[in-house]
Image: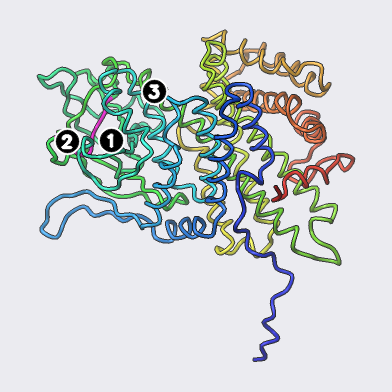
Amino acid sequence: MAATTHTVTNQAPPLVGHDVYGTDRALREGVERHLSAAAPELLGAVREELHELGRAAGSAQAQRWGALANENPPELRTHDRYGNRIDEVEFHPAWHRLLGHAVGAGLTDAWGRPAGHLRRAAGFFVWSQAEAGHGCPVSMTHAAVPALRADPELAAEWEPLLTSHVYEQGLRPPGRKAGVLFGMGMTEKQGGSDVRANTTAAKPLDAAGEYLLTGHKWFCSAPMSDGFLVLAQASPSGRDGLTCFLVPRVLPDGTRNVFAVQRLKDKLGNRSNASAEVEFDGTWARRVGEEGRGVRTIIGMVAATRLDCVLGSAAQMRQALTQAVHHAEHRSAFGARLIEQPLMRNVLADLALESEAATTLALRLAAAYDADTEQERAFLRIAVPAAKYWVTKRCTPMVAEALECLGGNGYVEESGLPRLLRESPLNSIWEGSGNVQALDVLRALQREPMALNAFLREVGLARGADHRLDSAVKGLLTELADLEGIEARARRVVERMALVLQGSLLVRWAPPEVADAFCASRLGGDWGAAFGTLPHSLHLGALVERARIAG
């Protein structure tokens, strides 16, 4: 066969060797905006750390680690060669390199340093674009801190290890490690999201705060972590006794705690990460918080991981957009580059709009965590579940559309987009599916008047700037005033709340062409049921240019 038939033309070069942070205008501007308001003295140092992380995330090495971690999923070893139960999960070395880089970059360290949540959120957004699966233990380790603070003694023991910038793999007593990772075990076969249906029982020991657990967990994330926060029934009747417990994998004397990993889940995506079914049978645990107040104790962890769901989905959306724009910039068809053709430009502009709205909202939530005022805590009570509902829901259709921009090339595993597509539904399911989030918003509306006031105050900061936004806010208020059938309408209500919030943030902070396009399409009704149906009169070229991989 003649070699000339294999000359490669009209293909996009590999998207490698770029600064994931520095080339993302919406992310970069958002970080600088919030940091300038909260801690301007940190601007230089944070810029440097995020650019460094961005270059690492865009490197060929990190991309290779991500591919290897997914091509070589974790394997369960229940017994050693002699028949002893060991319950270990083995990961490819690439997984450990990804985790080591994440921990070393401070992605489990937010609660104790200035502007910690904003800089950590931006770092999580950047580094998870190298590979999403390892973000699970990173997220839970970060999120365990507020739950453990319900017990000052436990917090003093574990928090320095959870927020450490040192990653040490392997099971050893926590006191012999420079840093630890945490997982979570809440759901059971019979209950799922209804954790009050849990049947795992906790029997108190003579020592204060110590218990033995017996039961099962249907989903236990990151089973090779050093410790886990779990829910179990501490009441003999099994009613109203749901309590939070800390379960270490290795006890202080060096012996293994009873933690029987029955099997690993065979998942659609997220294949680099292990999710397990585990059995407790006389498993030693420490109580965290008050007996019978398990949900209240662990809710801080849940809220923090929900924010990471928003960040993770926004990162996937940005990653998909980046691939689509890069391909269209280098691929020609019908006599012109794809990026110059009006219909493709409309698709790319629409994807860019969705990505920027998600990024802007995620950073606003992270900044609210840093502010930690009564007003901001009330705002987060509604804004986090609303954002978690909407942003994670938008991720899968956006990734699918971006894949289509590459045509058959996008459908091939080597492009990376099939892996991204398989990953995309996860954040909508994890930490409560769409219905759970929508009902959580309704509970906040009904029980916490300050939350709605804080939400409306935030949205009201953009009042009068765009008539379509003002009209959408008015329509939302009318809908909130009608309580008939509110539970059946919950998804519609929460969708509107999320869109109004995104619109208000973009009107205040984004370039005029971005805010105009969002309000026209998402709030003004001039939008179809698929991406690529923006009004043709909008400044679509400016939206695409803003999304390009450029400094």
Q: Position of residue 377 (x, y in %)?
A: 52, 16
Query: What number is the disc on residue 227?
Result: 1
Taking depth in this image into account, of 504 and 161 the one nearest to the observer is: 161
Q: Earlier in the sequence, mark 1 or mark 2?
A: 1
Tell me the crowding category of disc 3: few under 14, some 14 to 19, or many 20 or more residues within 10 angstroms, Cα based: many
Q: Residue at x 60, y 18 (%)?
A: 486
Q: Residue at x 38, y 38 (%)?
A: 165
Eyeballing the image, is 417 above or below 221?
below
- Magenta span covers which residues? 245-252
Asked if the stretch drawn in magenta spans residue 250, the answer is: yes
Taking depth in this image into account, of 360 and 397 the one nearest to the observer is: 360
Q: CA distance from mark 3 to mark 2?
A: 23 Å
Q: In the structure shown, which secondary structural element does the residue marked by tag 2 occupy? A: loop
Q: Earlier in the sequence, mark 3 or mark 2?
A: 3
Q: CA distance from mark 1 to mark 2?
A: 10 Å
The amino acid type, in three-letter code, at marker 2 is Leu
Classify residue 36 as left or right of residue 66.
right
Corner quadrant of residue 289: top left
Corner quadrant of residue 533: top right
Q: In the structure shown, which secondary structural element does the residue marked by tag 3 occupy? A: helix
Q: Position of residue 432 (x, y in %)?
A: 47, 31
Q: Earlier in the sequence, mark 3 or mark 1?
A: 3
Tell me the crowding category of disc 2: few under 14, some 14 to 19, or many 20 or more residues within 10 angstroms, Cα based: some
The amino acid type, in three-letter code, at marker 1 is Gly
Eyeballing the image, is 294 above or below 14?
above
Q: Residue at x 81, y 61 (%)?
A: 337
Q: Which residue is mark 2?
A: 251
Q: Which residue is mark 3?
A: 146
Eyeballing the image, is 447 above or below 298?
above
Q: CA distance from mark 3 to mark 1?
A: 15 Å
Q: Position of residue 97 (x, y in %)?
A: 40, 52
